[in-house]
Image (cartoon, rainbow, N blue to C red):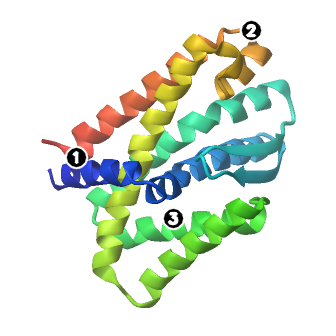
Amino acid sequence: MEFIFYILLAYVFMKVPVVGPNLRLLNTLIHECSHVLVAKMTGGRGHSIKLHPDTSGTALVQSSTRFSGILSTYAGYTGPSLTAFALFYLLKQGNYQLVMLFFLTLVVGTTILWIRNVFGLLWSISFAGLLYVLFYYELDEALLHGSIILCSIVLLESITSAAFIFFKSMTSPREAGDATILQRVTWIPAVIWGMLFFVQSVFVGVKIFLQYVGV
């Protein structure tokens, strides 16, 4: 029940100018990392990640096979949903510091390995710096509340970003991001991929709500 308040608060933060886009970039980072990690896991390579002020991002990967490329592209919207599920599981167990350590490790690791544009580097360094300060000064209350809010943002953004791509796949199938790419390599219409992204994000969101948030 207590998580509901934080999810509502996270939604408000997401709408605040400047603050919202910078917080939403955390989901973008997970999205792009999912592309890179799956490409590497299937024998390919991850070259770079770029993050942009409008909360969009790009990942430059080299897939080993056509099937590897499909998996890597598909992972973009699947990764954030699965990550949100795992993070809420940790929250339910009371592992708030572990959740924040995950975010810190994610940001620092991607900064070193893959983030290659100026804005992305500035964002990741400042975000990592903020998390480091919370750990260094042992601000436990901030770590607790911050972990729930950040997890809530990842959850909400995983659903809203998938909904946006689903909408784009219906209205502008040639400009629907990953759904368009998958259409080109599989000949399955972009709208089908967009619908799949959205349905799976809602499914995971419902599972999180039923298992970890409650009423």
Please report whichever mark, 1 or 2, sits nearer to the chain's N-terminal start. 2
Q: Is residue 11 left or right of residue 121?
A: left
Q: Nearer the viewer, residue 67 or 117?
A: 117
Of the two numbered discs 1 and 3 on the same chain, state the one appearing first in sequence.
Answer: 3
Q: CA distance from mark 3 to mark 2?
A: 36 Å
Distance, label 1 to label 3, CA atoms, is 21 Å
Q: Looking at the image, is mark 3 or mark 2 earlier in the sequence?
A: 3
Q: Could you say where residue 67 lies in the image, as x and y percent from the top left?
A: 78, 25
**Mark 2 — residue?**
187
Compute the Cα span from label 1 to label 2: 39 Å
Q: Secondary structure at mark 2?
A: loop
**What residue do we see at 59% from left, 16% from top?**
169
Task: Name which residue type carries label 1.
Answer: Val
| Callouts 1 and 3 close, C-beta under 8 Å | no
Three-letter residue code for mark 3: Phe
Q: Which residue is mark 1?
A: 213
Q: Residue at x 70, y 66 (%)?
A: 121
